[in-house]
Image (cartoon, rainbow, N blue to C red):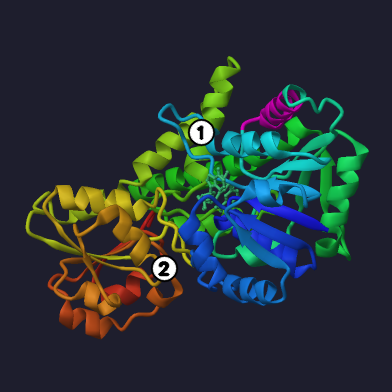
Amino acid sequence: MKIAIVGTGYVGLVSGACFSEMGVDVTCVDIDREKIERLEKGIIPIYEPGLKNIVTRNHEADRLHFSTNLPAILNDMEIVFIAVGTPSDENGNADLSSVMAVVRTIAEHMLKPLLIVTKSTVPVGTSYRIRDMVRKRLDERGLPGLQFDVASNPEFLKEGAAVNDFMSPDRVVVGVENEAAKGLMTKLYRPFLLNNFRVIFMDILSSEMTKYASNAMLATRISFMNDIANLCERVGADVNMVRRGMGSDSRIGRSFLYPGCGYGGSCFPKDIRALIKAAENAGYEMSVLKAVEEVNNRQKDILFQKFKDHFKGEMKGKTAAVWGLSFKPETDDVREAPSLTLIGSLLEAGVAVRAYDPAAMQEARRCLNDSIYYASDIYDAANGADALIVATEWKEFRLPNWSILKKIMNNHVVIDGRNIYNMEELASCGFAYNGIGQ
Ligand SMILES: NC(=O)c1ccc[n+]([C@@H]2O[C@H](COP(=O)([O-])OP(=O)(O)OC[C@H]3O[C@@H](n4cnc5c(N)ncnc54)[C@H](O)[C@@H]3O)[C@@H](O)[C@H]2O)c1
């Protein structure tokens, strides 16, 4: 089976590599020439555990190819996946310009039957728009009889565990219009789910909605817990205990109940905005999601507020060590990361920032340029700092040597945005500790 995946980012590269691991002949296509040239040389553009091995192995086995030329390979393919970015536009809607650029190329160059699958997260109805655009162009090109199908196959992988999620998914959601498309998608996914076939077939509109509804549910749990945590602080309860007490209820479950400094990343913020906008366009108000977004915007400011409160507003000339820049551990993705909100506020208040992240230094530099000091490790970041602020819960931050930190820091303050430390333990080491919801 030959497939193309257009858009070789977090989703496209992981999907392409994993499909090729199962024996599918995959071509990953991107308009970024430099990215494709580097991939040809075995240089992986993103940090994602396990990805390099699987890309290298399948590229060497001639099952995984890279290209910048979709028209040249298109008519060799049975299926083309669209996995390009769908960021927010200036109004919060999903910007579909990259998706539509790919669709135009397909419609312009298609000569054989094809299944066009949308893997990018797109508003409900987009696959039908794609179908209509392609049909119109084929008619204009004098090819009214040329058959093709569209399908929706939203992606649920988590950055930081993407390869594992793709290889062993909880479920695969596929929206189709007919048995032919269903048959092809079954053939493609069966190797992943030999023992327990968890592909949920449905209509296309429901499939597109399932992706947004899933992200919205997860973001809601995070904002809900952040609200509970903030209330815990005010009434003297400990959110860590509350979370354990709640999560043990099988109706609630333990996942996504961790309070922190707000959700970020390339999906939740833009997808929540897009769903709110899509509802508005349909004449409906998503009241819960509006609150979820509002709580999150407030929560992204919480570390700065804690820093400000500790120093009673006297921040100018202070130095903050920031541990963690990526929006979550095990990725170098800093898109909409809480660390960037924090650093922006610190710099504006005249605070010098010394930052360290195990993987995201290069990505952070693209946003922050030379406005901060990029440290070589956690201790270099903490050297001379007035406060240590944890913005991402990387494993290597969990058990630092507190006696070294005591010696090298100017003031002994820890603001723990991810609740990874123990208040009593830090107090016994001579640190003032401030977590979330404790
Ligand atoms: N990142 C995630 O964890 C995740 C998870 C699930 C779903 N998604 C969704 O998947 C989609 C892709 O996300 P991503 O994080 O992989 O994006 P990304 O920004 O990492 O990658 C997108 C890639 O598409 C390429 N591209 C843009 N226009 C193109 C065109 N016309 N032709 C060919 N290539 C083009 C870009 O150069 C880039 O390499 C989005 O809709 C996103 O919401 C992302």
Query: How many marks are shown on the rendered structure?
Result: 2
From the viewer's side, name the closer residue of 237 and 210. 210
From the viewer's side, name the closer residue of 386 and 25. 25
Residue 227, horizontal then vertical, whole percent: 43, 43
Question: In the displayed structure, does residue 310 sit left or right of residue 108?
Answer: left
Look at mark 1 in the image and give the residue it sits on: 95
Type of residue at label 2? Ile
Q: Residue at x 80, y 63 (%)?
A: 192
Type of residue at label 1? Asp
Q: Do residues under tags 1 and 2 come within 8 Å of each other at their CB atoms?
A: no
Residue 303: tell me if it is visible: no
Position of residue 312 relative to residue 374, above or below, is above
Q: Residue at x 17, y 52 (%)?
A: 347
From the viewer's side, name the closer residue of 301 and 381. 381
Callout 1: CB less than 8 Å from ligand 1: no
For residue 389, which numbered disc appears in the image?
Answer: none
Residue 211: tell me if it is visible: yes
135 is within the stretch colored magenta: yes
Q: Which residues are magenta?
A: 123-138
Residue 166, horizontal then vertical, whole percent: 69, 61
Q: Label 1, secondary structure: give it.
A: loop
Residue 262, horizontal then vertical, whole percent: 41, 49
Look at mark 2 in the image and give the residue it sits on: 420
Residue 350, horizontal then vertical, whole percent: 11, 52
Q: Nearer the viewer, mark 1 or mark 2?
A: 1
Specify few, some or many for label 1: CA neighbours under 10 Å numbering under 14, 14-19, or 20 or more. some
